[in-house]
Image (tube, rainbow, N blue to C red):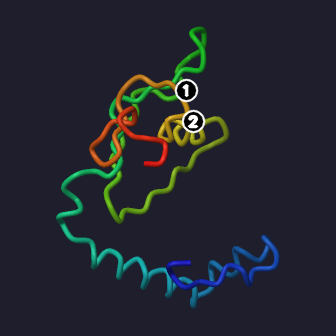
Amino acid sequence: KYAEVDVESIDNLANLRDVCMSEHVKFKVKKWIDETSANNDNKYKSEPLLELNDVCVQYSDYSNSVLNNVQLNVYRREMLSIVGHNGAGKSTLAKAICGFLDITGNIKFCNRGLNALSISE
Protein backbone atom coordinates (compact mmCIF):
# COMPACT_ATOMS: atom_id res chain seq x y z
CA LYS A 1 0.00 0.00 0.00
CA TYR A 2 2.64 2.54 1.05
CA ALA A 3 4.83 1.66 -1.91
CA GLU A 4 1.82 2.28 -4.21
CA VAL A 5 1.60 -1.35 -5.28
CA ASP A 6 -1.96 -2.40 -6.10
CA VAL A 7 -2.25 -5.79 -4.41
CA GLU A 8 -6.01 -5.86 -4.99
CA SER A 9 -5.36 -6.48 -8.66
CA ILE A 10 -3.86 -9.87 -7.79
CA ASP A 11 -6.65 -12.32 -8.55
CA ASN A 12 -4.87 -15.46 -7.39
CA LEU A 13 -2.27 -16.13 -4.73
CA ALA A 14 -0.32 -18.14 -7.29
CA ASN A 15 0.22 -14.87 -9.19
CA LEU A 16 1.52 -13.04 -6.11
CA ARG A 17 5.13 -14.12 -6.62
CA ASP A 18 5.14 -12.96 -10.24
CA VAL A 19 3.68 -9.57 -9.32
CA CYS A 20 6.10 -9.09 -6.42
CA MET A 21 9.08 -10.06 -8.54
CA SER A 22 8.26 -7.71 -11.41
CA GLU A 23 10.84 -4.97 -11.98
CA HIS A 24 8.13 -2.30 -11.72
CA VAL A 25 7.10 -3.45 -8.23
CA LYS A 26 10.72 -3.91 -7.10
CA PHE A 27 11.47 -0.35 -8.19
CA LYS A 28 8.46 1.11 -6.34
CA VAL A 29 9.22 -0.78 -3.13
CA LYS A 30 12.93 0.15 -3.24
CA LYS A 31 12.03 3.80 -3.86
CA TRP A 32 9.62 3.79 -0.91
CA ILE A 33 12.22 2.16 1.37
CA ASP A 34 14.88 4.67 0.29
CA GLU A 35 12.54 7.62 0.90
CA THR A 36 11.50 6.25 4.29
CA SER A 37 15.13 5.74 5.28
CA ALA A 38 16.11 9.23 4.09
CA ASN A 39 13.37 10.75 6.26
CA ASN A 40 14.44 8.79 9.32
CA ASP A 41 15.83 11.42 11.68
CA ASN A 42 18.33 10.35 14.33
CA LYS A 43 16.04 11.71 17.06
CA TYR A 44 13.70 8.80 16.41
CA LYS A 45 16.52 6.32 16.97
CA SER A 46 17.22 7.49 20.50
CA GLU A 47 14.53 5.49 22.32
CA PRO A 48 12.85 2.29 21.19
CA LEU A 49 9.14 2.42 20.43
CA LEU A 50 8.86 -1.21 21.55
CA GLU A 51 11.35 -2.79 23.92
CA LEU A 52 11.52 -6.41 25.11
CA ASN A 53 14.00 -7.35 27.83
CA ASP A 54 14.53 -10.96 28.95
CA VAL A 55 10.99 -11.93 27.93
CA CYS A 56 10.09 -15.53 28.70
CA VAL A 57 6.77 -17.29 28.12
CA GLN A 58 5.83 -20.68 29.52
CA TYR A 59 2.31 -22.04 28.95
CA SER A 60 2.25 -24.25 32.05
CA ASP A 61 4.37 -25.00 35.08
CA TYR A 62 5.29 -28.34 33.55
CA SER A 63 6.34 -27.23 30.07
CA ASN A 64 9.52 -25.77 28.66
CA SER A 65 9.67 -22.05 27.91
CA VAL A 66 8.26 -21.19 24.49
CA LEU A 67 10.16 -17.90 24.48
CA ASN A 68 13.36 -17.71 26.47
CA ASN A 69 15.15 -14.42 27.30
CA VAL A 70 13.99 -12.57 24.18
CA GLN A 71 15.68 -9.19 23.62
CA LEU A 72 14.21 -6.88 20.99
CA ASN A 73 14.15 -3.14 20.28
CA VAL A 74 11.95 -1.68 17.56
CA TYR A 75 12.43 1.99 16.74
CA ARG A 76 10.06 4.47 15.11
CA ARG A 77 9.78 4.14 11.34
CA GLU A 78 11.54 0.79 11.45
CA MET A 79 10.14 -2.18 9.54
CA LEU A 80 10.28 -5.62 11.12
CA SER A 81 9.30 -9.12 10.03
CA ILE A 82 8.99 -12.01 12.43
CA VAL A 83 9.67 -15.24 10.54
CA GLY A 84 10.38 -18.80 11.59
CA HIS A 85 9.36 -22.42 11.33
CA ASN A 86 6.07 -23.77 12.66
CA GLY A 87 6.16 -23.77 16.44
CA ALA A 88 9.07 -21.33 16.65
CA GLY A 89 7.09 -18.87 18.80
CA LYS A 90 6.00 -16.17 16.32
CA SER A 91 2.37 -16.11 17.47
CA THR A 92 3.40 -16.43 21.09
CA LEU A 93 5.66 -13.40 20.67
CA ALA A 94 2.79 -11.38 19.15
CA LYS A 95 0.42 -12.43 21.96
CA ALA A 96 3.02 -11.49 24.58
CA ILE A 97 3.55 -8.06 23.00
CA CYS A 98 -0.22 -7.48 22.99
CA GLY A 99 -0.37 -8.38 26.68
CA PHE A 100 -2.47 -11.51 26.16
CA LEU A 101 -0.01 -13.81 27.97
CA ASP A 102 1.67 -13.83 31.35
CA ILE A 103 5.38 -13.25 30.90
CA THR A 104 8.52 -12.88 32.89
CA GLY A 105 10.81 -10.09 31.85
CA ASN A 106 9.76 -6.67 30.66
CA ILE A 107 7.88 -5.28 27.67
CA LYS A 108 7.68 -1.51 27.18
CA PHE A 109 5.79 0.51 24.60
CA CYS A 110 6.77 4.19 24.32
CA ASN A 111 8.93 3.70 27.41
CA ARG A 112 5.93 2.54 29.49
CA GLY A 113 5.41 -0.97 30.81
CA LEU A 114 2.49 -2.93 29.38
CA ASN A 115 0.78 -2.96 32.78
CA ALA A 116 0.77 0.86 32.79
CA LEU A 117 -1.13 1.04 29.48
CA SER A 118 -4.90 1.04 29.13
CA ILE A 119 -6.65 -1.20 26.62
CA SER A 120 -7.27 1.75 24.29
CA GLU A 121 -3.57 2.61 24.30
Residue at 35% across / 47% down in the picture?
A: 50
Q: Which residue is mark 1?
A: 66
Q: Quadrant of the N terminus?
A: bottom right
Dot 2 alpha-carbon crowd within 10 angstroms: few under 14, some 14 to 19, many 20 or more: some
Q: In the displayed structure, would residue 99 be above or below residue 25?
A: above
Q: In the image, 100: left or right of 49?
A: right
Quarter residue 18 falls in: bottom right
Q: In the image, 120: left or right of 85?
A: left
Quarter residue 52 falls in: top left
Question: What whole-number distance in Å separates the C-alpha atoms at marks 2 and 1?
Answer: 8 Å
Residue at 42% across / 62% down in the picture?
A: 79
Residue type (three-letter) at the residue carrying disc 2: Thr
User: Which element carries disc 2, helix, strand or loop?
Assistant: helix
Residue type (three-letter) at the residue carrying disc 1: Val
Cβ–Cβ under 8 Å for marks 2 and 1: yes
Percent coordinates x, y for residue 88 in the rendering: 59, 37
Residue at 55% across / 26% down in the picture?
A: 66
Percent coordinates x, y for residue 22 in the rendering: 62, 85
Quarter residue 36 falls in: bottom left
Percent coordinates x, y for residue 38 in the rendering: 28, 79
Q: In the displayed structure, would residue 46 be above or below residue 26?
A: above
Percent coordinates x, y for residue 117 in the rendering: 39, 40
In the displayed orientation, state which residue is furthest to the top.
62
User: Which element carries disc 1, helix, strand or loop?
Assistant: loop
- Which of label 2 and label 1 is nearer to you? 2
Q: Of 77 and 70, which appears nearest the observer?
A: 77
Q: How many marks?
A: 2
Q: Which residue is mark 2?
A: 92
Dot 1 alpha-carbon crowd within 10 angstroms: few under 14, some 14 to 19, many 20 or more: some
